[in-house]
Amino acid sequence: MFSKDNLSYAPIALPDHIDLDDPAMREAANTFLETMKTRHSVRDFSTQPVPHEVIETCVRTAGLAPSGANHQPWHFVAISDPVLKARIRAEAEEEEKRFYAGGASDEWIKALEPIGTNADKPHLDDAPWLIVVFAQRYGQFDDGTRYKNYYVPESVGIATGFLIAALHHAGLSMLTHTPNPMKFLNEVLGRPDAEKPVMIIAVGHAAKDATIPAVAKVKKPLDQIMSVFD
Ligand code: IYR
């Protein structure tokens, strides 16, 4: 993606200069809050297909995220192939069985109780798309030599947030899923060792009878998540 001869600074005028007045800003902020309030992590998916280009467009949005030195240290693998999804489910459930059967600490298992999870992961088959997020520990110049990436977890976290917001905005439901360990995803998806799997996002339409854990609606109030020095 980068070339060693293309590392000079060249400022351009800010494109898409946005300059809302205060009322318009308030309204935009409130509208987006209301939109994001309707996002819930969903574990019960319908098998109804989702067009390929919607997933592609949402990944384009993810790719607009800010990143350390603009290195964009991420790669997204989108999977709708049922055979591959079934293989990912089988491998993930193997990991999850170990996790729930003693791999995880008692404290961790207790923390998950209100979420109601177990080693069974039908969403990995049912959801029409799985998007696996990879973080690139280092990049490579066109000539194959390596360059370092910076703030990789932060950058990939921001891009994943963009992706989740984009998927939700498109009317899709999703679940972020992190089998532990996830190394099997490199092998199954043919990704290089330089890339670390970060999470699987199952994406699709929620099943008609989908439920969410009641605790998922309990969000910290503003005064607990924000301090202000005005
Ligand atoms: N990966 C396991 C366990 C799990 C861990 C956390 I932290 C969660 O928020 C939910 C689940 C699983 O997917 O069941």
Image (cartoon, rainbow, N blue to C red):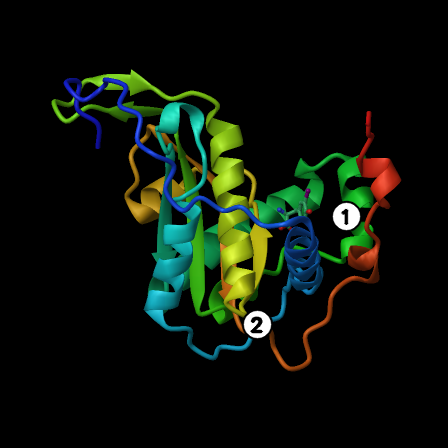
Q: Give the class, few, some or many, for how many residues have Cα within 10 Å of label 1's Cα (few <14, many ≥20).
A: few
- Per the rendering, the mark at residue 45 is 2
- Residue placed most toward the observer, 175 or 193: 175
Side (left or right) of 43 relative to 63: right
Q: Quick check: is the Cβ at mark 1 less than 8 Å away from ligand 1?
A: yes
Q: Position of residue 223 (x, y in %)?
A: 87, 38
Residue 158 can be seen in this image: yes
Does 17 sit above or below residue 44?
above
Q: Position of residue 151 (x, y in %)?
A: 48, 23
Side (left or right) of 217 relative to 180: right
Side (left or right) of 154 relative to 197: right
Identify the amino acid type marked 2: Phe
**Residue pictured at 26% horizontal, 23% vertical:** 10
**Residue pictured at 33% horizontal, 28% vertical:** 194
Q: Position of residue 6 (x, y in %)?
A: 18, 22
Does 135 sit above or below residue 162?
above
Does 64 sit above or below residue 168?
above
- Residue with the mark numbered 1: 112
Q: Quadrant of the N terminus?
A: top left
Residue 81 can be seen in this image: no
Are the residues flagged by discs 1 and 2 in contact, CB closer than 8 Å? no
Q: How many marks?
A: 2
Label 2: state its secondary structure: loop
Label 1: state its secondary structure: helix
